[in-house]
């Protein structure tokens, strides 16, 4: 580390310089206050300075006061060297901006220890300055994300930093701690959802509800095994539906995908085509991050499962 020494006494300057070089420091020596101030202001100038109190041009106190301007630019630790040992002088020196002091004639062990303290202070200031820069950079990025969002004027998807377009709710969840919950506003319900809800559902034939021939083929005609499978399905069904319902109410697309997949996998054992297709549709909604129509699909899958259960009874598959 580079250390500036300023003293108008040549003997003290020689002694200080030799001691600091022996301790491994790069030494810059000047003999008056104006030269010292000039060196401190230079780009890449010394960050640690040992200044004599009384010098021609500018004394040590004046340099300390002026050096406060540099404190916001780069770390600077000033140690005041003085023959004044009374308390008031020492207080004045510290209040002027000096970080430490050593009384002449200095003790080498004491001076070395105080220099080491100064080095640690400078390293700490550097570390803090680096962290502040990192935080400022992070905050700047956050402000850019919040201030400028490239959004499609048609589908309302947002372009992220990887040039990938994603739904606005997925983007918000990814870039903040907000949790998005999907619902339908009164206006959209009146213009879009209500017509869909009130649309009469076509009657499904028994083959569309469950393909009995395919189910029996899967169990090689073993009706008892089929009844055991159906009993397990009915036992697990409340939990499967509850998981899917909770995921939709939380607006968590990933959980919707997982819960719908589990329900679909269970329905596949019974070739329940319409119910399977609806569960698959919910799974795809979750995978794509768009579950705005999830509640309607969930209602459909519940209705289809009721038909499946009724058909189980009609076919005599209930254990």
Image (cartoon, rainbow, N blue to C red):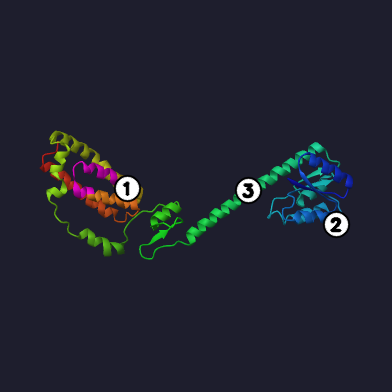
Alpha-carbon span between mark 3 and mark 2: 34 Å
Mark found first going from the N terminus, 1 or 2: 2
Secondary structure beneath label 1: helix
* Neighbourhood count class around disc 2 (C-alpha, 10 Å): few under 14, some 14–19, many 20 upward: some
Residue holding disc 1: 257
Pointer 2: what residue? 57
CA–CA distance between discs 1 and 2? 77 Å
Residue drawn 28% across the image and 43% down it: 262
Q: Where 190 sits versus 114, above or below?
A: below
The question of residue 280 being in magenta is answered with: no
Counting from the top left corner in percent of width and height, residue 240 is at 27, 43
In this view, the mark in front (3 or 1): 1
Q: Position of residue 228 (x, y in %)?
A: 18, 34
Q: Nearer the viewer, residue 153 or 192?
A: 153
Q: Position of residue 259 (x, y in %)?
A: 30, 45
**In front: 291, or 93?**
291
Describe residue 299's horizontal placement relative to residue 107 as left or right.
Answer: left
Q: Residue 248 location, x and y as percent?
A: 32, 50
Main SS category, magenta section: helix
Rendered image: mark on residue 128: 3
Q: Secondary structure at mark 2?
A: loop
Mark before the other along the chain sequence, 3 or 2: 2
Q: Real-space Cα distance between discs 3 and 1?
A: 45 Å
Q: Which residues are magenta?
A: 260-276
């Amino acid at each position: 580390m580079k250390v500036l020494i300023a003293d108008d006494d040549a003997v003290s300057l020689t002694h200080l310089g030799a001691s600091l070089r022996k301790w491994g420091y790069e030494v810059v020596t000047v003999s008056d206050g104006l030269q010292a101030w000039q060196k401190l202001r230079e780009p890449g100038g010394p960050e640690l300075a040992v200044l004599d109190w009384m010098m021609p041009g500018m004394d040590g106190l004046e340099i300390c006061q002026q050096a406060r301007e540099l404190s916001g630019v780069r770390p600077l630790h000033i140690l005041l060297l003085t023959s004044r040992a009374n308390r008031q002088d020492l207080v004045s020196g510290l209040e002027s901006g000096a970080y430490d002091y050593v009384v002449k004639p200095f003790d080498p062990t004491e001076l070395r220890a105080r220099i080491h303290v100064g080095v640690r202070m400078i390293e700490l200031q550097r570390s803090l300055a680096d962290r502040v820069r990192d935080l400022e950079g992070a905050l700047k990025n956050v402000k850019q994300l919040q201030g400028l969002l490239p959004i499609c004027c048609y589908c309302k998807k947002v372009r992220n930093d990887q040039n990938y377009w994603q739904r606005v709710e997925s983007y918000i969840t990814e870039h903040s701690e907000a949790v998005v919950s999907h619902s339908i506003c009164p206006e959209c319900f009146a213009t879009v959802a209500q017509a869909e809800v009130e649309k009469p559902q076509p009657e499904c034939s028994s083959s569309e509800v469950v393909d009995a021939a395919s189910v029996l083929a899967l169990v090689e005609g073993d009706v008892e095994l089929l009844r055991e499978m159906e009993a397990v399905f009915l036992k697990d069904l409340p939990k499967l539906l509850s998981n899917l319902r909770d995921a939709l109410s939380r607006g968590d697309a990933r959980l919707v995908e997982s819960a719908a997949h589990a329900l679909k996998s269970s329905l596949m054992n019974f070739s329940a085509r319409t119910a399977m297709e609806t569960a698959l549709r919910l799974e795809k909604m979750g995978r794509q991050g768009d579950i705005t129509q999830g509640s309607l699909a969930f209602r459909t899958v519940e209705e289809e499962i009721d038909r499946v259960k009724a058909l189980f009874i009609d076919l005599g598959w209930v254990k």
